[in-house]
Amino acid sequence: MTKSARALAPFSVVACIIALMATGCSCRPERPYTDDSRDPEAYARRIKVMILRQLPLAKTEKEEPESYTASVVGELENYKNNPVGSYGETYAQLLSQCQELHELLKQGGDRKPAIAKIDEIMEIANQLPGEVPTD
């Protein structure tokens, strides 16, 4: 083997690994797809996780805390287009409270009312089923 061939050998191995990864070859088996788009419990878990992950960030964000509430409000504004099951009233409460919080955060000023509102919203969200996974 020539000197230049030996120098390129490690790059060939890396290229092969990248090619295998790009073609979908991996060590993990694929998870089966589960369509839960019509499952009220799955939607409730998703909303709960979103709220309990996003809103605490709004408590600590100094620059634009309302950016964390915008996505929550956007999702909740469409809750009627999703499977709500027996949680319709909870979603309506969450939407109303999150809209109020979003406006409070946009106004700026004293954060105490917003932090209290976040705690209130998180309490409502905890009525929904499911646990928030720790990463």
Image: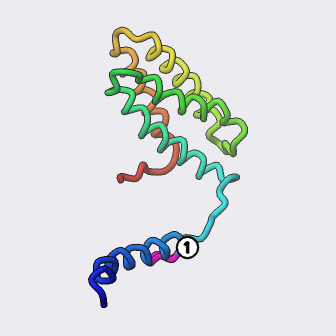
Colour scheme of the rendered structure = rainbow
State the image coordinates of residue 108 (x, y, percent, origin top left): 40, 11
Residue that extends furthest to the bottom in the rendered view of this protein: 1
- Nearer to the camera, 63 or 78: 63
- Nearer to the camera, 76 or 11: 11
Residue picked out by circle 1: 23
State the image coordinates of residue 120 (x, y, percent, origin top left): 43, 26
Q: Residue at x 44, y 78 (%)?
A: 16
Q: Residue at x 51, y 77 (%)?
A: 25
Q: Look at the image and say whether residue 26 sits in the magenta stretch.
A: yes
Q: Residue at x 36, y 9 (%)?
A: 109
User: How many marks do you count on the picture?
Assistant: 1
| Secondary element at image label 1 | loop
Q: Look at the image and say whether residue 30 sits in the magenta stretch.
A: no
Q: Which residue range is magenta in the image?
A: 25-29
Residue 34 found in image quarter: bottom right
Circle 1: is it few (<14), some (14-19), or many (20+) Cα within 10 Å? few
Q: Residue at x 42, y 74 (%)?
A: 15
What type is the residue that disc 1 sits on? Thr
Quarter of the rendering occupied by the N terminus: bottom left
- Side (left or right) of 68 relative to 61: right
- Side (left or right) of 2 relative to 46: left
State the image coordinates of residue 55 (x, y, percent, origin top left): 42, 32
In the image, residue 129 above or below residue 35: above
What secondary structure is the magenta-colored segment mainly?
Answer: loop
Residue 99 found in image quarter: top right
